[in-house]
Image (spheres, grey):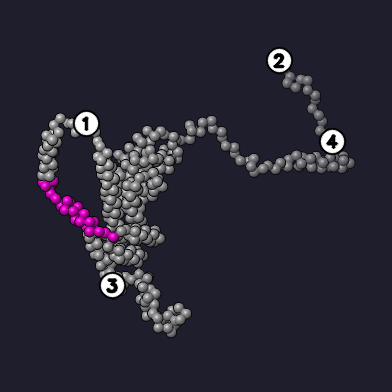
Amino acid sequence: MAENLFEGLPPPSVNPPPPSSSSIEQREPQLHSKTAASADCDAPIPVLKSALKRPKPVQSNPEAAAPAEKKLRFKTTTDASEKQVIEAMQKIASHIKTPGKFGKASKLALQLIRAGSVKPETIDHFFAILEAAMSSPTSCTDPSVRGEYHALFSVTNDVSECLNKKQKNQLTTWTIMAVVANDLFTDDSFVFSKASGRIKEIISNLPVATEDDDLEEAATLENETKTATEDGQIKSDKSSAVPLEETSKQEFDPFGLDALIPSTAKIGERRKGKKEAGTKIKEEEETKRFLKSQREALITCLEIAARRYKTAWCQTVIDILVKHAFDNVAKFTSRQRDAIGKLWASIREQQMRRKQGKSITGKLDVNAFEWLQQKYAGEKISIRHAVGGSGERRAQQWLG
């Protein structure tokens, strides 16, 4: 027999009678108090906005969680030994000759300078990097690597105190080619004017060219025009003359006793004098070589500036630059003087064409300076130096 599920429970209560009016009045204040208390309990507690932010998950291994990104990074400091630095410089020198690898190799060379690895102990190896970079004189003006050359040789001047006199002279010439010449390709008028001012300053500091410089230039031109057969004959003559000199020395001193004779004081003084004379000759040769390379670099800069003469805002600066070079033409060799003369004649022709309203394009090509020069050339200046007065002094002298 199934058990009674309602066993042990009290019987159902009878429906309560309807409440009277007195009981309702007694319960109303109790309900008001309960509703107020429940309203106070249900009111939300104010929460700060900072507490609503989602906390960042703590990563035990951030390197493993984040994906690895391949980036080209260079250390700002280095603790490499001198041997490792020298090996790195030798590798850079072997790769910097290639135009495709020049960008990366030059950045590594710059990093060596900024890390302080270029010292008197390693300066010769670093100078070999610069020699390899400038193995081709025209490569520094290549548009693809022009900016890298400019950055490399601009920063290299910071370590120039470690170089000797010969290396400093060579660096000066390379700086003209890699920095000043590349500034002439800029689109900034201020940079272009600054580069032009540096060229004028270098030209002013040059000494006057001598006849020896002209003769040396003519000799180098003759050597360049020699054929390969003549060079081969000279080499064969030198090779045949060497054994004759050796045999004559052997016949003069067959037993080698001259080396055993003690040197006297006079011989020592002669050797000292010869050594001093040799050092002076080397210094003079180095000075001549430096001036020659500097003049050639300046001629290259003038040629680059002349090619930009079609740009309107460059014309006035180029006019002043070429005019300055023509006024100091005596400081160049004969061949360079001819080049500067032709360049100045071309500039003068372009000026006359612009003043006549003619140009290559057939349009009126007059820059702002020349337009103002023509405008105020017929004006009169008053006593108070005001244009348009009743004075008779003209503005031609004022505008050149």
Q: CA distance from mark 3 to mark 4?
A: 125 Å
Classify mark 3: residues with Cα within 10 Å, few (<14), some (14-19) or many (20+): few
Which of 338 and 135 lies nearest the eye of the viewer? Answer: 338
- Local SS, label 4: loop
- Dot 3 amino acid type: Met
Q: Label 2 to label 1, Cα distance in Å?
A: 145 Å
For discs 3 and 1, the disc positioned in front in the rendered view: 1
Q: Nearer the viewer, residue 84 or 325?
A: 325
**Where does the magenta region start and end?**
208-231
Q: Which residue is mark 3?
A: 352
- Which quarter shows the N terminus? top right
Kindly report the secondary structure that dominates the magenta region of the rendered protein.
helix
Q: Name the quadrant of the C terminus.
A: bottom left
Give the number of the disc on residue 17: 4
Would you say the residues marked 3 and 1 are in contact, meaning their CB atoms lie under 8 Å apart? Answer: no
Q: How far apart are the two marked residues, 4 and 1, measured between alpha carbons?
A: 151 Å
Query: Of marks 4 and 1, which one's residue comes earlier in the chain?
Result: 4
Mark 3 to mark 1 CA distance (whole Å): 79 Å
Residue occupied by mark 2: 1
Say which of marks 3 and 4 sits in front: 3
Q: Residues within 10 Å of mark 2 (few under 14, many from 20)?
A: few
Res. 104 visible in picture: no
Residue assigned mark 1:
260
- Three-letter amino acid code at the position of disc 1: Leu
Q: Secondary structure at mark 2?
A: loop
Q: Could you tell me residue 89's position as x and y percent?
A: 35, 38
Q: Are marks 2 and 3 in contact (CB under 8 Å)?
A: no
